[in-house]
Image: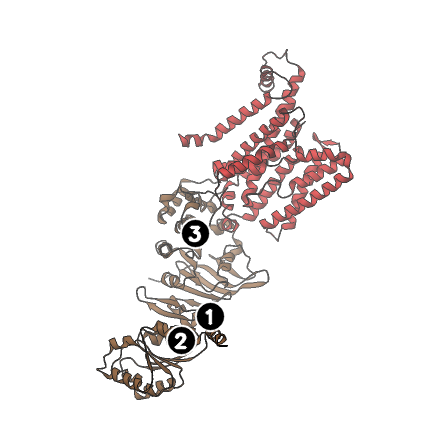
Amino acid sequence: MQRLMPKIMLNFKDVVAAYGETNVLQGFSATICQGEFVGLIGPNGTGKSTLLKCLTGLLPVKSGEIILEEKNNTDYSQRERAQLVAVVPQSFDIDYDFTVEDIVLMGRNPYLSYRVKESRKDYDLVTEAMRVTKTLTFRKRYYNNLSGGEKQRVIIARAIAQDPDIIFLDEPTSALDIHHQIEVMELIRNLNLNKSMTVVAVLHDINLASRYCNRLILMKDGQVVVDGTPKEVITEDNLKKVYDMKMFIQENKLFEKPEVIPLRVIKETETYRSLRIHVICGGNKASQVLEELEAMGHHVTAGVVNQGSDDWTICDVLGIPMVEASPFTSISLEKQEENLALMADCDFILISDLPFGHGNVNNLTGLENLSGSIYFHKNCRNNDFTEGKLTKCLSEIKSKKKLVEIDDHQEFLEIIKKQTHIEDNKALFEDKK
Amino acid sequence: MKSKLKKHAMLISIIICMIIIYLCTLMGVASISFGEANKILLNQIFHIDLGMENISVGATAIIWNVRLPRIILAFVTGGALALCGAAYQGIFKNPMADPYILGVSSGAALGATIGIILKFSSSFLGLNGIAILAFIGSFSTILIVYNISRVGRKVPVATLLLSGIAIGQTLSALISLFMIFNQNEMSQIIFWTMGSLNGKGWNQVIAVLPYVILGCVIMLTSVRELDIMLLGEDTANQLGVDTERLKKKILFSSSLITAAVVSVTGIIGFVGLVVPHIVRMVTGPKHRVLVPFSLLFGGVFLILCDTLARTVTAQEIPVGIITAAFGGPFFVYLLRKRKKGGV
């Protein structure tokens, strides 16, 4: 059987739109086919909501055109357009006492006029829409007295009652708790799957977008940056370009979709004096201390790190210089020396909480000859598989210089903070005067 | 039981209105007995003669040519103002909106002031020149306000309200200026602006009625769209309402009605503001119910106020004073009683 080409529902051709003089959309192009679930993502102010305004005819297009189901968007009347496109805004309040049923019935407006009254069929569609969204039980209640999640479902019911071909959602989940976020997204996905409704959703939560949409359009400055499947779009490179911050991306094993873990935006480099710090790590426990040290503005290095470990990933994302080694191999003499060289000019060296075995204990050889102060995480002793070699290394270091033992990484961070905090030191200095 | 009551609420209200109209016709300063008044009404309306020989021509004239047209004009005026108020509050999404908010009243007052000063006494279709000038004044004010606030094809609501207020204030200043230079006519102008139904007859009723009926029809055909307008203009657009067309339709018909009414009666305040709110508290915000009930209640409210105006003291009080004096406190009472966000 020949596969049919999917029907093109929406075609944005080089759309430029502006509020006054400033262009918000600057040549947005995308084609959306029937049955797709498209997520529009991107930072605030990139024109996602403007796109909605252009589509619904509230804002005229400056140049370019929008083709809605084979006809230019400007050729539709409000009424005709509302029969094709339904909009679900962020949940909003109404100053008047309308019941849930009143609100949902308003969705039938595009099919009614003063001559055409609500018929049996309209009421049936409204009831069905309320059934699907589980709002039927409170249809007689006032909309204003509902919770945020219930309100959002009512608005979705209204959109369903509109019997559209395309549903456009503008941040449908941003005011909801996680339970209701998932509920709303599942509801929309069911519409998409069961009724092959075309869905376009502006979403701020990239993880929700990744999980539910089968296509994502990443926007910046009124243009498309990338357009593709979640796996193609959600990459560190793409997101870094758009959001101007460091992000950490991993695959969510449960949904087999990429998942974003945003790292911090506000750095504390102003508050702390910068030091050279080396962290001996390579397992899965030093990520947090690495990230915090980096955020404080210290010049951090790490080694010797096993490729693919959590510590390795965080160094990679943050751009922390490190000595790498392939997993499950002993650290070669070469790597060991590389690591020593990195540590040579360090003010502090942290032996982080990691298991030591024959493969990596030589991370510690030669430390006694370095100038930096050395801190040692006590818990290493509980994961010592070196048959005494670790203890030997430590006593060698102790024989030549001071080895400070700490109970956890937080303690180390506190020590560093105390030593480098600019305000504190100033106060100390003034006291002395 | 309750739903049955709801179903027949309109019918019951209409009957109550008729009864009030009837009772108020019987009341007045001139002493005409209950029986006489009834006989006159039956004779005039149904041509049933129950012995008219004892009744003076004067009494018939008072009932039929003075009281009844005045009461009907009060009903039409009050109803029209309340109707326009309800529609304006809907499309402006603003509880402070009333039929005069766009400067219709100031325009009418300026027209009337000019008419009074120029002693414009010629009449046309049974209306005096002052009313005609007032009508011209109010309708041209709306056109000016509309064109000031228009941006291309669109009329932003906020701009419309502000330019209405601005133009209204400017016109009021002009009126004051005219009054300063024409102190002889001052009291007449002030009386006109306070609004009165005194001395109005069938001519005025007939002059106003077509506009009011036309306006009612236009508004009753837009009730669903007016409901949706309460969710905000953007949402209304997305639900298939051509909001710009609806605004024009409502603005045009409301202005026409208000202009017609104001030019005949002067500025009767508060009815258009308070009545829709009071009705909304009972019926809810749906215009399908709100609009007809505002019409009825506004009409009855003004009849009652006018009856007080003409019977309480020997010197007739302008009805605008009564509506404000009763409407204001009553509204405050309702607001306090129902201290809830949405009115």
Q: Determine the secondary structure under disc 1.
A: loop
Q: Determine the secondary structure under disc 3.
A: loop
Q: Quadrant of residue B116 in the image?
A: top right
Q: Quadrant of residue B124 in the image?
A: top right
Left or right placement of residue A429 versus residue B307 in this view: left
**Amino acid type of the residue tagged 2 in the rendering:** Ile
Residue mark closest to the camera, 3 vs 2: 2
**Amino acid type of the residue tagged 1 in the rendering:** Asp
N-term-proximal mark, 3 vs 2: 3
Q: How many marks?
A: 3
User: In this figure, which residue is indicated by the disc labeled 1?
Assistant: A244
Q: Nearest the camera: A154 or A318?
A: A318
User: In this figure, which residue is indicated by the disc labeled 2?
Assistant: A416
Instruction: Classify 10 Å Cα crowding around label 3: few (below 14), some (14-19), many (20 and above).
Output: some
- Residue B118 shows in this picture: no
Q: Determine the secondary structure under disc 2.
A: helix
User: In this figure, which residue is indicated by the disc labeled 3?
Assistant: A164
Whole-percent x, y for residue B266 in the image: 66, 34
Q: Which chain is brown?
A: A
Instruction: Classify 10 Å Cα crowding around label 2: few (below 14), some (14-19), many (20 and above).
Output: some
Q: Nearest the camera: B44 or A304?
A: A304
Check whether the beta carbons of the residues at disc 3 and disc 1 lie within 8 A of each other.
no
Rendering colour mode: by chain
- Residue A240 shows in this picture: yes
Q: CA distance from mark 3 to mark 1?
A: 37 Å
Same chain for the residues at labels 3 and 2, yes or no? yes
**Circle 1 chain:** A
Q: Colour of chain B?
A: red
Q: Nearest the camera: A270 or A30?
A: A270
**Amino acid type of the residue tagged 3 in the rendering:** Pro
Residue in view at x 41 percent, y 30 percent: B4
**Circle 3 chain:** A
